[in-house]
Amino acid sequence: MSSQSKVIELDIIEAQYTQFLGKRYLFLLVLALITIALAGTAVTLGVIKLSIGQVYEAILHNFLPDQFQATEEAQRVVWNIRLPRILFGILAGMGLGIAGAVMQVVLKNPLASPYTLGISSAAGFGAAVAILLGQGFFGSYLIAGNAFVFALLSSMIIVAIARHKGATPEIMVLSGIAIMYFFSACTTLLEYFADSDAVKGVVFWMVGSLSKASWNELYVLCFVLAVCIPILVWKSWDFNVMSSGDETAKSLGIDVDRTRNLSMIISSLIVASIVAFTGTIGFIGLVAPHIARMVVGGDNKFVLPGSALLGGLLLAGADVVAQHIMPPVILPIGVMTAFMGIPLFFYLIMRRRKGYW
Amino acid sequence: MVLKVKDLVFAYSGVKILDRVSLELERSEVLGVIGPNGAGKSTLIRCMNRVLRPQSGKITLDGIDIRDMDRIDIARRMGYVPQASKNSFPATVFDTILMGRRPHGGWKSSSSDVKKALEVLKLVSLEDLAMRDFTELSGGQQQKVVLARALVQEAEVLLLDEPTSNLDIRQQLETMEIIRRLAKERGISALMAVHDLNLAARYADRIVMLKGGRVLDAGDPFSVLTAENIKAVYGVEAAVKEDDCRPYILPRGSVK
């Protein structure tokens, strides 16, 4: 009798667990649908007035030129300006979101983000070198190329130090902070001796913008994300185990140092490919993972895709607001994400649950 | 013979924590490791599954040097219950237990992993906590979850670092009974560091007594848990009685 009641109880737990997983898959699905809806709406908004019908005819005209007619202007506005910008916003937000989630979990630090580890100031220095001195890598992509190389360089330094001294979260976070200050100081020094117009260019680059997005950048980012995101999601169970402590993770067969270094390199690669084209866009990588965790809990199988989708939604949403809040002026996206992100962040801090971070 | 430790030396920045420790763990055996704080019990356990790297000495599992094994192979064969466990991000009790299936699986848990985790959940009577958050539990409940995680690993060797330190008296006995039953019924070998001499006396087949990183004595509970040994190792005057064919220690006071 008693054994039978236990069996039923286990069935109930299994059903609860299945339902628990189901809700989380549903959350991801809903986020994906909202993202599509946002993209679908944003493409109809803009300074140049086009009706919804014109916009969608212009989109479909590219695939089925016979069935759908579109004006030259509508084609150009939709395909060359609006679509790449929206898609780039979504992809960049996804990349920043998932990179932030991974860095937080492998460094066991809720404050870790793509930027607290010096990647942004290194990228900023690379861009400043290109803008102020005209020196750098990759001819036509001078600024982006420089920013990319320096962003990766900063994370290589962190990983190199970690290899030498052991890949503990403390060593990585402290090295990251040191690198951040170092490159900020370098940039300041450059600006100090440069003329004011050029400095203005650096400042504009630093605040971040999606206006440079075109299909070429989009393809590059798409490729990077298509390679990196699956690797990170595939490692999500290892990340879960690692947040129970390095010793536990080792006892469960995980090569902790290697996993930590690998995930730092992959997430830095993602961030570097975004920052190079957009400049510094803050807060997405910090806030999106925390919101995701508040909804789905700590299982990285859901946190990582959730952070990516939320990041995409936040960044693309912020860009829509930045473009339309005081037309025809387009506010810098980096400012917008900070203005939208900080109140949200304070809200999260006020209502954070006990026991974590 | 399952696990063999020979002349193990481990030092932190020149200070020897373990000094030529040798011991053997047989199949189906429960081995208690006792000794005062700082005797090297936890360090010994963490060297055995290569969480720590000893400076010298050899550990073999069925004749294979564990230095020649992958981390994942070790994890399939040795389960580890740390003294304390801290989560830096939230996880449900059930997900925490499922982590024990990580050495056997791919990138996520399968339905057979879920079945096994459910069985262990029942074995340690944590059914009502399955969907709760690990960090919301009491220290004792957390300890049982961590034990469950090691059990679901289905390893043939269990390394337990004071598995009962946070448990009330009933749960201490239940946990020990589970470990003993697994040893006798499934041929699992368990090595556990224990502070409570009477628990060690009651549930261990053999006892290894450590002091200052050295093995002071090893053997069956009666031969190791003598008044002289207890005095030498702990500095405690104790009377050793017999109860239920096991030694029973009555501490009388610290040696002045």
Image: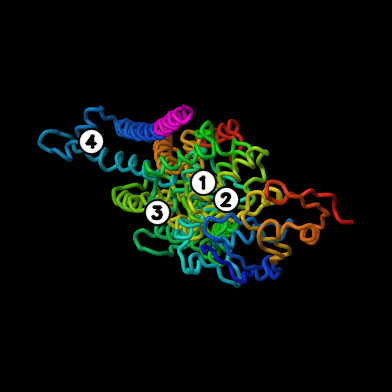
Residue A6 percent across, percent down from the top left: 47, 30
Asked if residue B236 lies left or right of residue A316, the reply is right
Q: Let me know if residue A224 appears in the view.
A: yes
| CA gap, disc 1 and disc 4 | 60 Å
* SS assignment at label 2: strand
- Report the colour scheme: rainbow
Q: CA distance from mark 3 to mark 1?
A: 39 Å
For the residues tagged 2 and 1, is the chain the same?
Answer: yes
Q: Percent x, y for residue B206?
A: 63, 58
Give the distance between the C-alpha atoms of the residues marked 2 and 1, in whole angstroms: 8 Å
Q: Chain of mark 4?
A: A
* Secondary structure state at the residue bearing disc 3: helix
Is circle 2 on the same chain as circle 3?
Answer: no
Q: Chain of mark 1?
A: B
Closer to the camera: disc 3 or disc 1?
1
Question: In the image, which is nearer the foreground, mark 3 or mark 4?
Answer: 3
Subunit bearing disc 2: B
- Residue B172 on image: x %, y %: 64, 42
Give the residue pinned by disc 4. Answer: A74
Marks 2/3 in contact by CB < 8 Å: the verdict is no
Q: Name the residue tied to disc 3.
A: A273
Residue that numbered label 2 is attached to = B81
| Same subunit: marks 3 and 1 | no
Cα separation, mark 2 vs mark 3, equals 42 Å
- Is residue B238 found left or right of B136 in the rendered image? right
Position of A295 relative to A193 (above/below): above
Quadrant that contains the C terminus of chain A: top right
Q: Residue at x 53, y 33 (%)?
A: B129
